[in-house]
Image (spheres, rainbow, N blue to C red):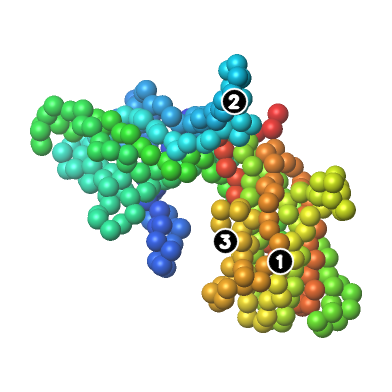
Amino acid sequence: MNNCDPDFNGGYPVLLIMRDFDPTSPTFEQDIVTVPIFGPNFEGQGISLLEGYSGFYHTPITQIRENYAYQAGSTASDYPRVEERILDCDIGVQGRNWAEFVQVETLLWKIMKPPKGKRPDFVLRFYFGPGEDDWREITVRLERTPKDLFSRGPGLTTKYKWSLTLLACDPYWYSRTLQDTVTFDTGTGSGANRISQRTLVIDNMADQECWLEYASSELTTTSTFTLPDALGVYPKWHTSAGQRIYVPLPPLGAGKQFHVQTNPMQIALEALDDSQEVANLQGDFNNALPPHTVGAELPVTLKGGTAQTQLSVYAVQQWDRYFGGEAL
């Protein structure tokens, strides 16, 4: 028995994934090896997640406090610092015979301890329901050398137990990225003065804010896009108080294809021909899509372009924990 819900991913609710993190590789971001992890009562050839794991649930935070002269106590910030995540767990490795055991051990460390020069990260994916998209995953690496918890030598056992401490520098769990696409197939005017307006609709079901990303199809003529800054509006002291904030992109010529990242920690605008279009960007993105947002409407405008021009929005959903957290 594997002590797992048979309805969760066909009875394999936890997966250990070797993913290609090399951006120069033809298989970049693809899963190279996927290994099921069973429950603590599993018998046979495979890997088990044993009882007593921790750090998988809430994201670690540190409350930021300031002390002022003559103040009793302190003043807490509304924005606690989110720390890296440390996950502790014990795993069991076993086979029905010595050869099977060695095979599983070899595969395990091929994923968790790749050769020097390879990025030592791997992915843990947890399924929490019977649906195809009922999963969340986190990217981790070994924080320190695994502690072996066994006493028999080669050939004398077919079971090993390891105590692992894992590090997730990005502490969030990620679920499937949501997407919406529009085609600017109708508009007013023609040529460079053609104006077409559409509305993208996207959700953020997660319990964390979401920084949207946009991407265009390959452009065949000069195109100028205007994008909303998520749901952001101008403050009440502004001359446009209460109105939506929009960020105009610079005109992009034929053959261009762009990627916009609204997260201020990332490059805001990248063209796939490596031209430095971000230098021509007039404005900044400062607003994320709030947690538990359903049906956010994002009006977008295209000047120029053609009836085949497309624009997509992506919501990369990040979560505090590997199940739960949806809006009630």
Q: Residue furthest front?
A: 69
Crowd around label 3: few <14 · some 14–19 · many ≥20 (10 Å) = few
The tag earlier along the polypeptide, 2 or 3, is 2
Residue that numbered label 1 is attached to:
282
Question: Which of label 2 and label 3 is nearer to you?
Answer: 2
The x, y position of residue 15, in whole percent, is: 42, 41
Tell me the CA gap for discs 2 and 1. 40 Å
Tell me if residue 325 can be seen.
Answer: no
Residue that numbered label 2 is attached to:
68
Looking at the image, which is closer to me, 234 or 257?
Answer: 234
Q: Are marks 2 and 3 in contact (CB under 8 Å)?
A: no
Q: Residue at x 63, y 81 (%)?
A: 255
Q: Secondary structure at mark 3?
A: loop
Q: Quadrant of the N terminus?
A: top left
Tell me if residue 26 can be seen.
Answer: yes
Residue 213 placement: quadrant: bottom right
Residue type pointed to by label 2: Tyr
Looking at the image, which is closer to me, 154 or 242?
Answer: 242
Q: Residue at x 63, y 50 (%)?
A: 211
Looking at the image, which is closer to me, 19 or 299?
Answer: 299
Tell me the CA gap for discs 2 and 3. 37 Å
The x, y position of residue 153, in whole percent, is: 10, 33
Looking at the image, which is closer to me, 148 or 290?
Answer: 290
Residue that numbered label 3 is attached to:
267
